[in-house]
Image: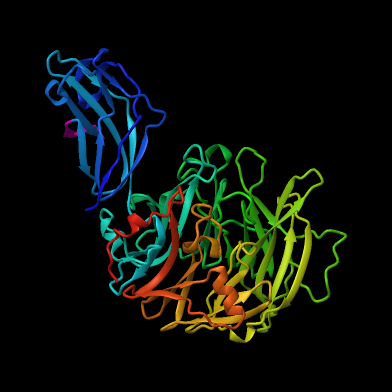
Amino acid sequence: MKRKTILFISILQLLVITGCYDDLGNYDYTNSTKVSFVNSASSDYTFMVGDLFEMDAPINFSTDIGNVDELFTVQWYLNRELIYTGYHLKYQFEKGGTYELILKVINKETNETYISNKYTLTGKNSFDWGWMILSNKGDGKSSLSFINPGLRATHDVENIIEDGLGTDPLGIYYYYVLGSISGSYVSGLPKILINQGSGSVTLDGNSLQKDMWLAHEFENRKEPEGLKIMDFAFKEEYYVICSEQGEVYIRAVGTDNKAIPYYGKYGAMPYEFEGGSRITCFAPFHNVTYWCADEERCILYDEQNARFIGITHYPQWGAVYTPAIVYFKTYDQDLEVPSGVLRVNNMGAGTRCLAIGAYEKKDVASNGGLTFWSNYVSLIDVQGTGNYDLHEFAVKDMDNNSHLITGTDQYGFSGSSLLTPQSVIKMSSNFEKNPYFYFTDGDKNLYIYSMQMRSHMLAYTAGSCITGISGSPVVCEFYGYGGNSTDPNFRLALSQENGDIAIIDVNTSQMVRLFEGFAPDLELKTFSGFGDVKGMVWCTNYEGEYQLEKENNLSVNN
């Protein structure tokens, strides 16, 4: 195992206690001129699972005491259990999680005993920056694999989960409990939601241990029967689950509770939209940074009523906080809707929506202030005729009182003839930063569409039928966690019917070459042995770190 030395320069505050501390004993804790704990501004530290964790005791001893080990006994307690005796701790953690660490110092001559304050150790696995893949390898079990930015793959990650993961895998989703780590506006506690037939469960994103059964997040403590999640949205003040059955479940959180994991409950029954609904397309927009097109919004397409519906934060509190449900009924009176452009509240009977993305727009006021708003883009099958168009609409304010449509447009999609019922399409809310989206012909070919040029190009041909597309942050969402990094943020993972996953490079320079007709080789590496892939998500730690040294020490199994 890799050795990692962690030195604590300033850690603990002097704490003098009289009384008892559970299993640490009953002592008189007195001051001493020979011993003091080091003051610290922080008491939270992180270790990597599997690495040898080493640290010197955060204690100051007077210079005249001689050999510390001869005069003092230093004991280290982890979750109130003695794990080590000695001034220099050496300990290897076998699993992640959150631990309470306390030190006890005993003067062997006088029996004077001192106990430190508590501080926290957080154990992280080496699966915090890259793709987590959920699959069925033929035995019905939910299997996890991981591909890091260093293009190393690890299989059978589920083996580190106590009591196993489950069976009948259906989908995987990654999110954050926002505001949970002080001092960073993009802070959060990472979570991984596994949708599976044996019972959907959320894993702690650091330890990969089971955190919460999805059933317990519902009011009746039951997971909806046969729930197969289409997609999942997490926002600061609400969460949304949208099922492939077209049902929507909403959990309200609110400003005061956004830092609390699993606060609030999903309703036992699906949300009832005005006039009924059957949601067939859902854009959760997974951004968590400020100044993104989707910051607190998600967009749904209701095929039953051929309309778009919005969900957004609404800064108004009643007896119970609820997000705003936005029915796009109102157009700016000065807006001229071009002939043939469908209205977002009535797209015409039979119209299907295949995907939804967005631009981030901004207005600059005379005083230099900025207003950010969204321009939404959808790929639609007009009235079910197979006539595929791109439809855009803009709305500057979005709550249940203000939702004027301030712009709209509709134009033909150049790749219409290539689309089939098996096509995979990936849009984003990041077209301002990366003006492309990705689609397949329902088989081996991946095409890239340029929003600027309004045309598409064949980009890659896989070894077998492409079944899924997952982008790194800048490609498909601007997560902010590591979102300002370089190359790893411009990649696509393509799952295939034969159990392979290809990683391709879609950075800006490659896209320029592609649309100039140079046919660049985009493939970085293809991995095998994943089985039937049910979903892929990009994981990232809350600091957005890209640690190549750590990645090079991951095991390779491909």
Seen in the image, is 95 located left or right of residue 169? left
Q: Nearer the viewer, residue 311 or 186?
A: 186
Residue 72 position by quadrant: top left
Q: Which quarter of the rendered picture does the C terminus lie within?
A: bottom left
Residue at 57% in and 50% down: 289
Q: Which SS type dominates the magenta stretch? A: strand
Seen in the image, is 422 located left or right of residue 529? right
Where are the magenta residues, as a range? Answer: 79-86
Residue 132 position by quadrant: bottom left
Above or below — where is 138 with respect to 428? below
Residue at 61% in and 79% down: 515
Residue 82 is a magenta residue: yes
Seen in the image, is 474 located left or right of residue 392? left
Above or below — where is 377 with respect to 32? below
Q: Position of residue 174 (x, y in %)?
A: 45, 57
Residue 356 is a magenta residue: no
Q: Nearer the viewer, residue 106 or 444?
A: 106
Q: Position of residue 206 (x, y in %)?
A: 37, 50
Q: Nearer the viewer, residue 348 or 122?
A: 122
Q: Position of residue 519 (x, y in %)?
A: 54, 82
Residue at 57% in and 79% down: 514
Res. 547 visible in picture: yes
Seen in the image, is 69 located left or right of residue 53? left
Above or below — where is 328 with respect to 440? above
Q: How is the model colour-coded?
A: rainbow
Res. 247 visible in picture: no
Q: How many marks?
A: 0
Q: Position of residue 317 (x, y in %)?
A: 65, 39
In the picture as drawn, the residue positioned furthest to the right comes out as 334
Above or below — where is 127 with respect to 317? below
